[in-house]
Amino acid sequence: MKKLTVGLLLALAALPVSAHTPYLHAKGEITANGGLVSMEASFAEKFFIPEAAFDNSEFQLTSPEGKRLTPDRVEVWKARTLAEHRLDNTPGTWRFSTGKRYGALFRVWEVDGKRESSRDAAVKIPEGAKVISNFQSVTRAETYLTVGAPNRTALAAHGEGLEIVAIDHPTDLYVGEQFRFNVLFDGKPLANQKVEITEVVSDTGNTPQVITLTTDAAGNASFRSERATRWLALTRHRTPAPQSSGVAEYSHSYTLSFRTLAQ
């Protein structure tokens, strides 16, 4: 697959963490007999208006029976990656995932007032240098669609990496109801973890509503929507990186797109 240009990667590194968020948005005419689903994955500041393609990852589907599948077709364009898959008539809920994407190395340091950078893991940061940044992004974006009545098999936790695990079903949410979820890292709850939920307004041009939540000691949080609309939930978490990675930290991010329906 194509790679982002070096210039764009450096620009993304200079942006605040709230900018250029990954997302996966699925749509299609879904009936009891299934249907053709189109998945759009991108990095953006406003949802769902794509700016940079989500590339270098293996897109995945999980069927209502728990089977792991790959999309029928994946195409990478400049601003977005598009994946298509024809769902069969298996009733229940499907998970769509970008898979984990290991991004560029963001390594910037300063020696004697001169700033240098490298994305090559073989290039070592000089001893005594002032480290400005030294991390690699690890991103995954997911969403769900249901054929017929929802079920929960595809909602099971991955058990590795950063993820939002739905307690209330993400394709069966209505205005005024709670959407409870759990934030995990490597299968363990993340306490006091920030989750930012942003309204999707690309269809209207309105200023999006942004709600910030913090998980409790068990990694749980709850969100109530007062309008029928689409949302994107984002959480980020940094961890030490393996020595073989060439960076000090991994910067994990996970997004879940979902919608609330009118009563």
Image: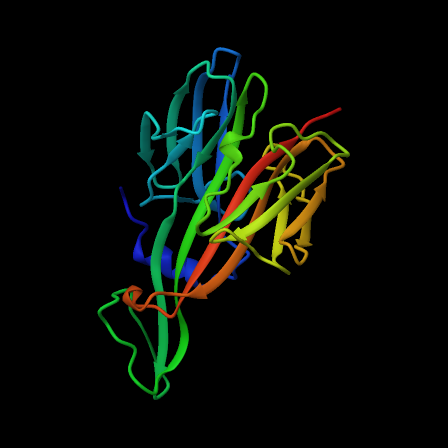
Residue 159 % position (x, y): 46, 47
- Outermost residue, left side: 122
Of residues 26 and 5, the one drawn nearer to the viewer in this rendering: 26
**In the rendered view, would you say 100 is above or below 96?**
below
| Residue at the image position 50 percent from the left and 51 percent from the top | 187
**In the rendered view, would you say 37 is above or below 185?**
above
**Quadrant location of the N terminus?**
top left
**Quadrant location of the C terminus?**
top right
Residue 253 % position (x, y): 48, 53
**In the rendered view, would you say 186 is above or below 33?**
below
Q: Is residue 204 visible?
A: no
> To which quarter of the image does residue 209 belong?
top right
| Residue at the image position 32 percent from the left and 50 percent from the top | 4
Q: What's the image's color scheme?
A: rainbow
Q: In the displayed structure, does residue 88 sit left or right of residue 243?
A: right
Q: In the displayed structure, does residue 209 sit left or right of residue 141?
A: right
Of residues 99 and 24, the one drawn nearer to the viewer in this rendering: 99
> To which quarter of the image does residue 250 belong?
bottom left
Q: How many marks?
A: 0
Of residues 159 and 144, the one drawn nearer to the viewer in this rendering: 159
| Residue at the image position 75 percent from the left and 34 percent from the top | 177
Q: Is residue 198 visible?
A: yes
> To which quarter of the image does residue 229 belong?
top right
Residue 208 % position (x, y): 66, 44
Of residues 262 and 244, the one drawn nearer to the viewer in this rendering: 244
Residue 126 % position (x, y): 28, 82
